[in-house]
Amino acid sequence: MTTSSSQVRIGVIGTGAMGTAHVTNLGSWVSGAAVTRVFDVDAERAAAVAAGVGASPAPTTEALIGSDEVDAVLIAAPDPLHEELALACLAAGKPTLLEKPIATSLEGSRRVVDAEVAGGTRLIQLGFMRRFDPAYVALREAVLGGSIGTVRAAHCLHRNAHSHPSHTDEGLLVNSMIHEFDSVPWLLDDPIAAVTVFVPRVDEGALKDVQVAVLETVGGSVVTVEVSINAQYGYDVHTEVTGTTGTVSLLPPYGVSVRRDGVDGRVVGSDGTLRFEDAYRIELGAWVRGIRSGTPSGPSAWDGYLANVAAFAAVESLHGAGRVEVPQHSRPALYDPA
């Protein structure tokens, strides 16, 4: 898939909220792409989602990845399957958009990177959609353009409305805060050097929600990250960066204002896929363009690995290790900037 005239035929694995949103966006918003096969363990749901875009359901993930009707694969399956499916896609030589995290263990993350490096071609793009969000892109441009002087600190909020029964204490870091472990070094162009995680006192056996991490960067900045997966009032993401001559921050991303019952304010949505709707569409478009041109440009498997390195350092801190230094690794040549 290296010619601009080729249509990319995509197989999608997973038809939960994220996978279904991706199928819809690929079918309605991304030119040069067509969803051809869909798989989910819920065969009826997979068939319904596939029918909506003129695709056909696949009986297994192996059948989808190996299909002659699939040029590229989008993985939106549960986290524990990410490593296995990514390795299968690499073995098949198929470009892959892999939702975060890259794997549910640090060793698994490295296995994916090593397999891609051994193949000699970048095939995996990680689903860190914030890098494509227009507001985050503008924020990064302001920070790196020097408009606030030298960066001293940043403050991040990341709140989900309701937790899922499967959520764990560690999951807040490896599945939710993973976005900050990627977006902070990207936003500041400064790697994470150390992490310390703090949690409020909760009842015995209760989910440790909220969690607050203090990140130290290699360049000397300090970043606070507050993550909650049970905020109740809605989905809310915010970032502010403080420099020596000013600050820059995201504006509230809610577009509807309501006056009712004595309250005048903006409506807060409950779904992250709506907040980052534009980002997901731009992300998919960039992925497809990269496949067609043979020049991938999105977050790489190496970026996914580095995010997991920070996340699992945070897990150590959560379990009583206090301040944990984040190992700094040499980037394989495959991931050097073009």
Image: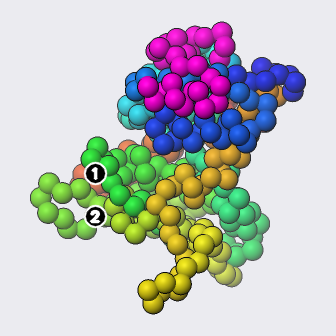
Q: Check residue 199 in the rendering and tell me which mark sits there, or answer none.
A: 2
Image coordinates of residue 83 in percent, x first then y, are 45, 26
Q: In the image, which residues are magenta?
A: 44-70
- Residue 169 is labelled as 1
- 239 above or below 247? above
Answer yes or no: do the residues labelled 2 and 1 have beta carbons within 8 Å? yes
| Residue type, numbered disc 1 | Asp
In magenta segment, residue 266: no
Question: What kind of element bears circle 2?
Answer: loop
**Is residue 65 rendered magenta in the image?**
yes
Quick one: SS at disc 1?
loop
In this rendering, the answer to whether 328 lies above or below 31 is below
User: Where 88 falls versus 230 (above or below)?
Assistant: above
Of callouts 2 and 1, the N-terminal one? 1
Q: Position of residue 38 (x, y in %)?
A: 55, 24
**Residue at the image point whose x is 71% and y is 46% from the top:** 282
Residue at 57% in and 59% down:
275
Residue ID at (45%, 30%): 45
Give residue 74's mark.
Answer: none
- 150 and 90: which one is in front? 90
Label 2 environment density (alpha carbons within 10 Å; few <14, some 14–19, many ≥20): some
In the picture, residue 135 is in which quadrant? bottom right
Where is residue 80, by image quadrant?
top left
Which of these two is toward me, 329 or 312? 312
Given residues 208 and 20, the one toward you in this image is 20
| Residue 209 appearing in the image | yes
